[in-house]
Amino acid sequence: MEPKKKGLDGSKEPVFNTTKIKRGNVLICVIKMKGQGSRISGFYKLSIKERVAFVKDFASLTEEETNLLHQALNLPTADRFIENVVGTYQLPLGITVNFLIDGRDYLIPMAIEESSVVAAASNAAKLARIKGGFKAEATEPLMIGQVQVKDLKSIEEAKKNLLSRKKEVINLANEQDPFLVKLGGGAKDLEVREIETDRGAMLIVHLLVDVRDAMGANAVNTMAEAVTSLIERITGGKVGLRILSNLADHRLATSRAVFDKEAIGGEEVVDAILDAYEFAKADPYRATTHNKGIMNGIDPVVIATGNDFRAVESGAHSYAAKDGRYKPLTRWWKDREGNLQGEIKLPLALGTVGGLTRLHPCARLCLKILGVRSSKELAKVAASVGLAQNFAAMRALATEGIQKGHMKLHAKNIAMMAGAKGELLDKIAEKMVQKGKVNIELAKELLKEFEK
Ligand code: MEV
């Protein structure tokens, strides 16, 4: 294979080799990285076909799998997932490049409708690579199943009895899922909490379940329901709700990265980012938007892999308020050399098996592209994308603002709405950005002018 392309960013180094294969009337361009893993310059400048060929090669996808990238979920499958199906709804699927996490290269599929997110994450990941990329950790995948116990004569007595017979409860829970137990998971512990409510005190039992590579809702809910009678017998109370908690604070993912001071714009930029972070730390109005930016990175990975984004969202925001006030999910500081360091920590209940992860063909494919071997690894990847996204947003906000980047794609969408196609689309969008004015009337006017 002959190296044909130079770095698309204008660098002298060839970034990848390409081979062109002709199949009937279709010319397929196969691109191979030159030992750089996910680090690629100018990925966005490739055609969709070239990008697909690159991903196919990177993740060793079959022809059939590759075709799934642009195929809608078929209706009979959709009809099995939810009720009253009348169609399917699609989102763009982008590939975020440049991620190096714990020394491993990842191409990260992101399903999202918002422009700039994929580009921002890729750019942040490129900058993080300078100092070794992301270093991530994840706790064991322990989920909480809650059992509400009411009408107790003595909460203290009920607590004592439950704790002394917790082995019995755990064993009964584990009888519901021998397969999970065989994999090393299952109910591991039991905690009791007392809560005061307007309808009196209640005892809340937490069943801690190691769900291994599943998100775990089914396993946990089944176990929580199965221990009802036993808990009622032990406590003498009445069991109410039995359901998992989305505040999965025993299932946390952490990721850290160092951003080289010079590479990100110097001391001034580091300080401006730290000021932005302090703003979020001190003000819940800002912290909410700060965390929204983080979820801009995490949700698309959660969606692309067929996971439950509502579960992840609710868990993240609840964790952000765990100290009684809503705070940022990231921390940022300056190291001794003046570089910017960041850390993210949040609950991430993500599965690589179960739910839609294997049933939705595109989710299955995205998991293959990611090449993650466990739910813990997926959580580390998602946390790293969240950190990258937060860095990118703060850097943009603290320097030139975010509108400049957003405007380019927004202008293209407006030009498209005005009826522009092909080359005219870019020309009209560019003209509107130059003028600092993006609206449909101007796009129509420009279209008329260009078509003259
Ligand atoms: C926009 O989707 C996300 C940001 O508002 C995040 C932030 O403000 O940090 C740019």
Image (cartoon, helix red, strand yellow):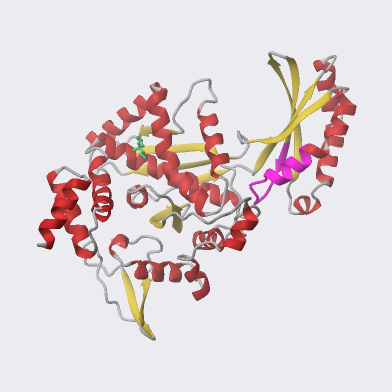
- Judge left or right: residue 172 versus residue 420: right
Ligand 1 in which quarter: top left
Residue occupying the point 25% across, 66% down: 7
Q: Could you tell me which quadrant the N terminus lies in?
A: bottom left
Q: Would residue 215 be counted in the magenta stretch?
A: yes
Relative to residue 288, is residue 263 drawn left or right? left
- Residue extending farthest to the bottom is 24
Q: Write the start and end of the magenta stretch as one range.
A: 208-224
Q: Can residue 294 be seen?
A: yes
Is residue 135 visible from the viewing direction of this image? no
Q: In the image, 249: left or right of 294?
A: right
- Seen in the picture, residue 337 relative to 118 is either above or below; the reply is above
As displayed, is residue 181 above or below residue 272?
below
> Number of numbered discs present?
0
Name the residue located 52 percent from the left edge and 38 percent from the top edge: 313
Whole-percent x and y of residue 422? 23, 64
Tell which of 102 and 173 is nearer to you.
173
Residue toward you, 407 or 384: 407
**Percent from the top left, x then y, of residue 152?**
83, 17
Q: Position of residue 347 (x, y in %)?
A: 56, 38
Give residue 161's quadrant in the image.
Answer: top right
Of residues 243 and 331, the one drawn nearer to the viewer in this rendering: 243
Give the quadrant of residue 395: top left
Q: Position of residue 362 (x, y in %)?
A: 53, 61
Report the quarter where the C terminus lies.
bottom left
In the rendered structure, does residue 301 fall within the stretch colored magenta? no
